Image (cartoon, grey):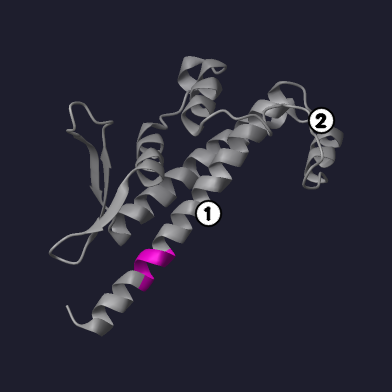
Amino acid sequence: MSQEETLAALNQYAADLGRFWLNFNSLEFILRLFLARKAGMGTTEFVQIRGKEVGQSAVENPITDWRTFGTLCADYNKGMPIPERLDFSRIVAIRDALAHGRVLGDESGNLVVVKYSRPKARTVTVEFKQVLSPAYLQVLSDEMTTLSHRITSMIGPYMKR
């Protein structure tokens, strides 16, 4: 692979990963908003949280709490009838791997995310491995967009002024 091809591939990866991250952040916020509205949080409370500055306190609620993405997904599904539950498993796994794994290059010039287990007797096990091709990242972005639309379509009954 020439230097120009390598730079083009890295630029493509950056754009694809940026699209993934934008869609992921949107999905997480939509989940938090859904859970907040379902818990009775109104617009006034949301605006108050948004206006906080560094050093100011805010009430803990579904927008501000420290739940992990996987826990948010599980909490969403717990409160939904079985036919309305969503499969977040692939998004949870790749998000966890990107947050806690390593992105490495392979001999073909592909970027690969690899997540290792915690060490046992100074040995680790590969827990997750995925080539981060443009096509794969696009599939994930499309899946997150679909999930976001499904959640948004369910939020109506919980909206209040």
Q: Where is residue 18 in the image (x, y as percent from the top left)?
A: 47, 60
55 above or below 39? below
Q: Residues within 10 Å of mark 2 (few under 14, many from 20)?
A: some
The three-letter amino acid code for the residue at tag 1 is Leu
Residue 42: numbered disc: 2
Residue occupying image coordinates x 67% and y 34%: 33
The three-letter amino acid code for the residue at tag 2 is Gly
Q: Viewed as shown, does residue 48 lie left or right of 113?
A: right
Query: In front: 121, or 34?
Result: 121
Magenta region includes residue 12: yes
Q: Where is residue 6 in the image (x, y as percent from the top left)?
A: 26, 76
Magenta region includes residue 105: no
Secondary structure found at label 1: helix
Residue 111: numbered disc: none
Residue occupying image coordinates x 40% and y 35%: 92
Residue occupying image coordinates x 59% and y 34%: 31
* Most common secondary structure along the magenta stretch: helix
Contact between labelled residues 2 and 1, with CB atoms less than 8 Å apart: no
Q: Earlier in the sequence, mark 1 or mark 2?
A: 1
Q: Where is residue 91 in the image (x, y as percent from the top left)?
A: 40, 39
Q: Magenta residues?
A: 11-15
The residues bearing labels 1 and 2 have C-alpha atoms spaced at a distance of 25 Å
Q: In which quarter of the image is residue 3?
A: bottom left
- Which quadrant, please, contains the N terminus? bottom left
- Which quadrant, please, contains the C terminus? top right
Q: Viewed as shown, does residue 83 lie left or right of 98?
A: right
Q: Name the residue under label 1.
A: 22
